[in-house]
Image (tube, rainbow, N blue to C red):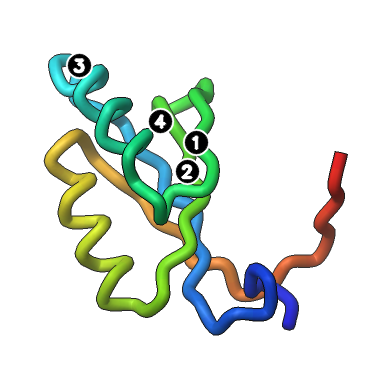
Amino acid sequence: RMGYPQGKETISAYIDINTFHDKKEEFVRRIIDEPLVKHCSSVTGSRNHVMLVHCPNIETLEKLLGELQEYGQTNTQIILSTLVQRQS
């Protein structure tokens, strides 16, 4: 199925976060140990980081968002489908 990693019924989402200045290092340590975070990049613009997460259900995504909001303001986009996916 498009939008689901490895054929599993999961919730995939992009989470943008604008970390609080004094929480940035703590945030990085937290996500390094989080298996739901599959990719995280530092970016330009109104947010500091963009993450790709795969959660088994919406409740897990909500819990993760609550935990991440301790480190800054988040914005979430749930992936409905993937139109292009390349391996480079």
Mark 1 is on which residue type? Cys
Q: Earlier in the sequence, mark 2 or mark 3?
A: 3
Q: Is 32 placed above or below 20 here?
A: below
Q: Residues within 10 Å of mark 3 (few under 14, many from 20)?
A: few
For label 2, the residue is 51
For label 3, the residue is 21
- Which residue is located at x 40 percent, y 26 percent? 48
Query: Hey, which quadrant is residue 62 in on the image?
Result: bottom left
* Cα separation between marks 1 and 3: 18 Å
Q: Do labels 2 and 4 touch, CB within 8 Å?
A: no
Mark 3 is on which residue type? His
For label 1, the residue is 40
Nearer the observer, 78 or 54 = 54
Mark 3 residue element: helix
Nearest-to-viewer mark from 1 and 3: 1
Q: Which mark is residue 47?
A: 4
- Which residue is located at x 52 percent, y 21 percent? 44
- Please identify the quadrant where the N terminus is shown: bottom right
Nearer the observer, 47 or 33 = 33
Expressed as whole percent of the image width and height from the top left, the position of residue 51 reads 47, 43
* Cα separation between marks 4 and 1: 12 Å
Expressed as whole percent of the image width and height from the top left, the position of residue 63 reads 20, 64
Mark 4 residue element: loop
Q: Earlier in the sequence, mark 3 or mark 4?
A: 3
Nearest-to-viewer mark from 4 and 1: 1
Q: Earlier in the sequence, mark 2 or mark 1?
A: 1
Nearest-to-viewer mark from 2 and 4: 2
